Amino acid sequence: MGEMMLHYKNLEVSRCPWCGEILKDLEPEKHSRSLRMICSFCHKESKYYQTSIESLITIFTGILIGVLVVGTKGFGELRYTLLLLAAPYFIYHLMHSKSLPFHRYPRKKYPERFLGRVSIFWYPTEKGGIGSAYIRMINNMILPVCFVDEKGNPVSQTVCIRLKKRFWFLWRNVGVSLVTDNLWKPDRNGIYPWEKAEKIIIYTGGNIIGEGKIQKRGNEP
């Protein structure tokens, strides 16, 4: 088990949803529903939004603390049930404290460009993957990628995109949104990389960790 963990790689750290650069000086204890960051590169504001599941667990966490601190007769095994429900919240933030996905703020006013959908294949550790990526990778994460054609030839420079799953653990038909659109340029014929690409190659720390087969192109989120 210990030997296997040695092959695990760290997750990609939080990136700015405007320019794709790494957001620095994130403090785990400050991660909350209202956490905001100012990018030191583009000086624009972003915000981390809890998912509905995280919010629900946060509520259970508050109830648990109240029960454990104040104590209430008649709760019986309820306090231990609440503890089990709250544990994933703390584990999630412990594992992902430096990798939480930020969004443009306010995101309704400044939406990212939706490109389409891909199905992701994460590489195993023996092929350079991060290890248990299907479970460890975070929904809405911003990652650097390169677009390639059917022969594997690059058709774009490295850009940052956001991957949004429809379901918590499934990486099929994942939504792709463009983050670094200032690098998104058409060729001499006016064709954009997304229009001529067949796959995306996904990186973290300069290493290839997975790929995505383009399933659908279009503007429907």
Image (spheres, grey):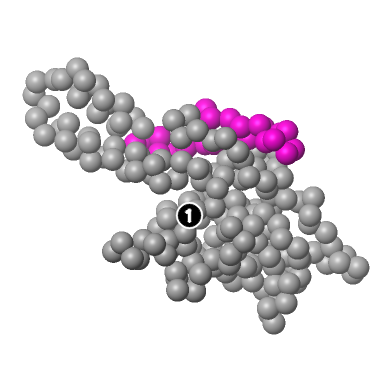
> Left or right: 152 with respect to 97?
right
Label 1 sits on residue: 10
- Name the outermost residue toward the bottom: 151
- Name the outermost residue toward the right: 188
Image coords of residue 212 (percent x, y):
58, 68
What residue is drawn where x is 53% and y is 30%? 35
Image coords of residue 189 (percent x, y):
90, 69
Magenta segment includes 124: no
Image coords of residue 52 (percent x, y):
43, 39
Disc 1 element: loop
The crowd level at tag 1 (other Cα within 10 Å; few <14, some 14-19, many 20+) is some
Magenta segment includes 36: yes
What residue is drawn where x is 34% and y is 43%? 91
As drawn, 205 above or below 36 = below
Image quadrant in which you'd find residue 56: top left
- Name the outermost residue toward the top: 70
In the rendered structure, which segment of residues is drawn in magenta? Answer: 33-57
Amino acid marked by disc 1: Asn
Image quadrant in which you'd find residue 14: top right
What residue is drawn where x is 84% and y is 62%? 186
